[in-house]
Image (cartoon, rainbow, N blue to C red):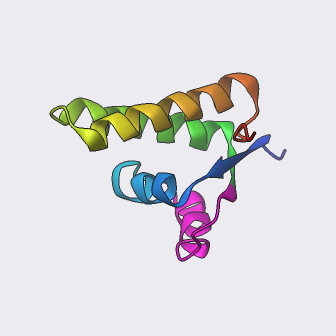
């Protein structure tokens, strides 16, 4: 049975943070690497299990840091990932 996936739009900065601090599963890591050189917002599909683990790993990285800009960026990213998990919608709001 296929797992439900959630499409999540990620900025280049968010993708970089996930690669460095999110310890993604191989499938997500490969998807992030495919769009590594892109300076555009890209969509990365994740199933709920992968997303839960990614959120947990980002939170772990946040808790191991002292305060600072990177920690604040990770907190914002974690909020977005949690909202995607909760609502099943990982699209950015664009005006």
Q: Is residue 42 above or below residue 67?
A: below
Residue nearest the viewer, comparing 65 with 52: 65
Give the residue displayed 29% in from the left and 34% down from the top: 62
Residue 44: horizontal and vertical position, in percent? 67, 56
Is 52 placed left or right of 90 in the picture?
A: left
Residue 89's image quarter? Answer: top right
Residue 91: quadrant of the picture:
top right
Q: In this view, does 1 lie above or below 30?
A: above
Q: Is 23 positioned to the left or the right of 2 in the image?
A: left
Give the number of callouts: 0
Residue positioned 84% across, 44% down in the render: 1
In this rendering, the answer to whether 88 lies above or below 13 is above
Residue 85 x %, y %: 65, 29
Q: Residue at x 57, y 55 (%)?
A: 11
- Residue 87 is situated, as x and y percent measured from the top left of the image, at 74, 24
Most extreme residue toward the top is: 86
Instruction: Name the image quarter holding the C terminus.
Output: top right
Give how far across and how far down residue 78 sits, in percent. Answer: 47, 33
Q: Which residue lies furthest to the left in this view?
A: 66
Give yes or no for residue 84 being in the magenta stretch. Answer: no
> Is 46 or 62 nearer to us in this picture?
62
Residue at image location 33% in from the left, 34% down from the top: 72
Q: What residue span does the magenta drawing correspond to?
A: 25-43
Q: Name the side, left or right, on which 14 lies relative to 7.
A: left
Q: Which of 45 and 66 is in front in this view?
A: 66
- Outermost residue toward the right in this view: 1
Is residue 39 covered in magenta? yes
């Amino acid at each position: 049975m296929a797992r439900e996936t959630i499409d999540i739009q990620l900025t280049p900065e968010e993708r970089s943070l996930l690669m460095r601090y999110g310890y993604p599963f191989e499938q997500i890591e490969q998807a992030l690497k495919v769009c590594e050189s892109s300076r555009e917002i890209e969509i990365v599909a994740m199933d709920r299990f992968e997303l839960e683990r990614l959120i947990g790993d980002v939170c772990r990285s946040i808790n191991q840091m002292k305060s600072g800009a990177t920690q604040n960026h990770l907190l914002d990213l974690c909020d977005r990932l949690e909202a995607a998990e909760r609502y099943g919608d990982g699209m950015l709001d664009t005006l």
